[in-house]
Amino acid sequence: MEQTDRSSRIAWAALLLASLIAPVVVGFDKYLIHVGIIISLNVALATSLWMIWSLGFISFAHAGFMGIGAYTSALLFTKLGLSMWYGLWLGAAMSGAIALVIALPLMRTRAVYFFMASWAVGEVIKRNFAYFRDFFGGWDGVFNIRAPKLDLGFVEVNFADRLAYYYLALFFVVLTVLVIHRINNSRTGMIYWSIHENELLAQHAGINVFRHKVIAFTIACALAGLTGALYAHYQTYISPKSFDIWKSEFALVHVIVGGLTTVGGPVAGAISLTVVDELLRATGYFRTVFFGAVLIAAVLLLPGGLETIPGRLRSFFKRSDK
Amino acid sequence: MTNKKSNLSRRLTRRGLLKQGSMAIAGGLAAPAILPKSAFAQTRTIKIGGAVPLSGPVAYWGQSTMQGFVDGAAVMNEAGGIMIDGEPYMLEVINYDTKGEVADSRAATMRLVEQDECKFVYSQAAASTVGMLQVTEPAEVLSIVACWGYLELFGTDYPLHFRGEMSDYEQGFAYMPFMIEKYGKDALKSAAFIGPDDQDGIDCHFSYERLMKHYGVEQKAVEYYNWEDTDFYPIVAKTIREKPDFIVTSPSPPGITASIIKAAREMGYQGPISSPAASETETILEVAGEHASGVILPVTNINPSSPTQKAIEKRFLERFGTFNALAGNYSWWIYALKAALEMAGTATDTKAVAEALAQVELEDTYVGRTKWAGKNAYGLNRQGVYDCFTTTIDDGKAELADVRFPDLPDTF
């Protein structure tokens, strides 16, 4: 167990180091830095979705909450002139607040009913962005959402520069993963997994299941909102279509392919599938077909997801030693 | 024999197959990234990039657009390339999929501009255009697209941005005169609009409103559907309750247009139904069947008749195994770009090429005569206009009924 923890820490440190030096490794190729930013955003979204999964729920509203964060930050900037530094936190707070209200009825549902209800919530959020045209910009969306600047006194960092934004996105994805990792490894995390395993039993053990479910859902959605704000100021344009059900589905696929039992799963899934999707871009018409084949292959050849690879390798080498 | 068999079985083990298969897949994945740079390294090349929806719900439009560029480049390369300032240049077309999404299109365009160093790009449909424009104008890259809406992203603020496809607005100045001739002005006093519930639908309704105002047609109903809808009877019922003389469905693809036609006819509606975006007859005939009558399809040349049109159809069939009128409509863009490059005498100064492109007029393309217009409306001549081939479907039979250049107003 100790060895596993040590290996895990080494793997996380290696990943962080690789992320920090990645721009140097790719020769500061602007396009590959863009891919790095997209990976960061996908990791953050998939990880926060995984947090809801740790309760045993699959939410299709997640992209909607990402959208709330994105729209909050975008509108604060375009209508009030407040920079992303406000938008990030207010976007996360808005997503969290709305999630809290919605979670009260939503978290009383289970299984397929939760699935359907979360799908409806995501769709209603998207439709609201489209319907209230004067406020949200309708289907037209919101343009000119600029990245911020940061004056450190001795130097001013302009995050419109892609390299700077890469490190900003990396900082927030590390923060998101760290928060979820800490919660998951705490007593609260164990409570979530006990709810995941058997909600009724957890309730009979004295756990306030409903409260924990509402709080976890709220935190996960707030983190999705934070990711949304980062997304908006990077893409500089958002529309209701940016946060439709497909966005939630892709995040879910990242979680499933990566693995469902540890926070490393969604991280691995989001990194690998974003890279695969990018490699397949040039295949044009066959992109979706190949992507589907890769997904099927991943599920069939790696049951349990990418997170099981280290364990499989350990077993393999142990067998080889004998 | 035994040795042979054992060799064979050794070669065909599951593990071996998986290993070789994965190597082949890895090679296949790496090839598109490697080939474009190596294959053309020795010649003077102009790279033209396509950030087009090649998968997803609007892939049909993206594929059709791509075919025009791939075919045109092949024809020009076979003829020795294009001459710029006395030097021959070959054309290389690189295509990346956008899935018809804004963020994906932005990413694809970044790759084309930053990695492949394309100075000329093309796209298809509104979402891909919005994503593309965020990259192309700041990078001074010339873009040619098919996009009907987002007019705030068109004109003097986007001087390198051309819209090669006539929108429903420009088409209207050809199909409305034709309909007035066919049915009589008194039979076309009022109209209704049916379109998708998104920005494309809203923009097309805006164009429709301007058009109907120009022709003095009263607007009786406006209905929007969701892209996921399969039952069009409710909105068609609401529309025909207002008793419009004719219906415009825009920008609705052939399947949805056919469903609207079928619903309208089954509920007893007799007036003409015009679809400026369907550009195809087979699906409409298949889905609407005996109800396919009184259908007006502008910019749909189902009967290639000139030598140029026939040659394009033949080449597309040979090269892609398929040909449709929409692909024919887009085939002139690359020829206009070629003329502009030759006229400007530069393959790198995109501003000079844009100025030249705005002056290009072609006489003999799949869509007949083409030119760029729109100066009075948008401040620059950046909107493609061309002969509008209008096909009609009556009593389940499609035929090319009219060809005319849009009678655009002076304000355009």
Image (cartoon, rainbow, N blue to C red):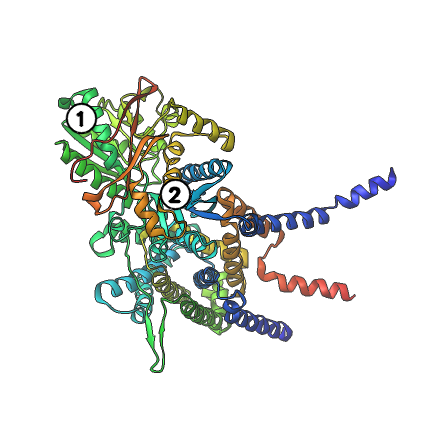
Residue occupying the point 22% across, 63% down: A79
Residue occupying the point 37% across, 24% down: B302
Q: Residue furthest bottom?
A: A154
Mark 2, Cα crowd under 10 Å, few <14 / some 14-19 / many 20+, is some
Image quadrant holding the N terminus of chain A, namely bottom right
Q: Is residue A302 left or right of residue A121?
A: right
Q: Which mark is residue B245?
A: 1
Q: Position of residue B254 (x, y in %)?
A: 35, 31
Q: Position of residue B35 (x, y in %)?
A: 56, 49
- Chain label for disc 1: B
Alpha-carbon distance for marks 2 and 1? 49 Å
Q: For this rendering, which residue is in front, A293 or A215?
A: A293
Q: Position of residue A139 (x, y in %)?
A: 28, 49
Q: Which mark is residue B342?
A: 2
Image quadrant holding the C terminus of chain A, namely bottom right
Q: For this rendering, which residue is in front, A88 or B139?
A: B139
Q: For this rendering, which residue is in front, B228 or A31?
A: A31
Q: Amino acid at mark 1?
A: Asp
When the figure is inspected, residue A150 is found, relative to residue B256, above or below; the finding is below
Residue B167 occupies quadrant: top left
- Chain label for disc 2: B
Q: Residue furthest right?
A: B2
Q: Nearer the viewer, mark 2 or mark 1?
A: 2
Report if the CB atoms under discs 2 and 1 are less than 8 Å apart. no
Residue occupying the point 29% across, 37% down: B371
Q: Is residue B315 left or right of residue A244?
A: right
Describe the element under mark 2 as helix, strand or loop: helix
Q: Is residue B341 visible?
A: yes
Q: For this rendering, which residue is in front, B158 or A56?
A: B158
Describe the element under mark 1 as helix, strand or loop: loop
Tell me which label, 2 or 1, sits earlier in the chain: 1
